[in-house]
Amino acid sequence: MYIATLLCNPAKPCVEPALVESLRNAWGGGEALWLAPDVAAEFSVTAMPENQWQVWEDLQGLGVDLVLQPAANRRKKMLLADMDSTMIQQECIDELAEEAGVGARVKDITARAMNGELDFNGALTERVSLLKGLPETVIGDVLDNRITLMPGGPALLSTMKADGAYAALVSGGFTAFTTRVAATLGFDENRANTLLVADGKLTGEAARPILGREAKVEALEQISARLGISEADVIAVGDGANDLGMLLRAGAGVALHAKPAVAAQCEIRINHGDLTALLYIQGYAQDDFSQNNSKD
């Protein structure tokens, strides 16, 4: 048995009952269950439809995401999340680069690295070198004035944690940012790279070893083993090439507003919904969402 979930951006409700019924009838699905009015609905099917991706493509034009997955073990025991452009709406290194006056150059490298065109470790080393001499205090300024949470993040964390799940933030970015973001959202732990500082200024180097694609896979292995759960019990979310390892290994790997080269390799692609999409595809209804108790 499989579950088909249709969802959209909660800020722009556009999942119409007629659309859900049409697809349900075409696929011989079970009764539709509405998880949130005009935002998310699901129904069961006995087999994966052969035209899944053609329908997915058609729905994209309507602003609707479609996810098909096995009905068994949908509700996960652990969230493993990327930070930049996933739990927050920015790339931290790009924002620091703006302050250092090298924004355009660094953004270009970031985009190419996230699309898999450049080696992540080399690209990070090059970008960090361009930040040399930037006052350490700029990090706090960027956090206060440039960084915003991705919509749906507080609901995702509070709901999964209220249901007993563990949450880990694993980023190729920097601990100076993950520490704040993890505390704000309620993550149980965070892992990232460390920017080196001397005399109150960035040295232009990051501590070794660099946390990249393989380190995210290691986090999946280590944390799931420590918790005594399987990798199938994990839902992972990210957007860049360095997230692919964990996305392909986790029980549910969600490419969220991901680079095309990344999304093409993932079975779960969310281009319109926000982070509450991760709740809907686990079968949570909007009425099940926990009130966010994280710190502001």
Image (cartoon, grey):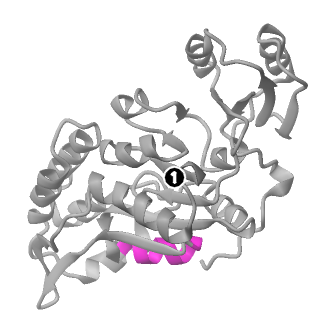
Task: Please name the residue that numbered disc 1 is placed on.
Answer: 231
Is residue 280 or residue 135 the one in the foreground? 280
Quadrant assignment for the N terminus: top right
From the viewer's perspective, tell me whether residue 217 is left or right of residue 132. Answer: right
**Residue that appears at 52% across and 30% down:** 267
> Where does residue 13 sit, x and y in percent of width and height?
75, 35
Quadrant assignment for the C terminus: bottom right
| Crowd class of label 1 (few under 14; some 14 to 19; many from 20; radius 10 Å) | many
Magenta-colored segment: predominant secondary structure: helix
Total numbered circles: 1
Mark 1: secondary structure: helix
**Is residue 91 visible to us here?**
no
From the viewer's perspective, tell me whether residue 196 is left or right of residue 235. Answer: left
> Where does residue 43 sit, x and y in percent of width and height?
81, 28
- Residue range in magenta is 177-186
Type of amino acid under label 1: Glu
Is residue 23 or residue 223 the one in the foreground? 223
Quarter occupied by residue 63? top right
**Residue that appears at 22% across and 39% down:** 112
From the viewer's perspective, tell me whether residue 143 is left or right of residue 41. Answer: left
Q: Is residue 34 magenta?
A: no
**Residue that appears at 41% across and 44% down:** 239
Is residue 248 or residue 185 the one in the foreground? 248
Q: Is residue 179 magenta?
A: yes
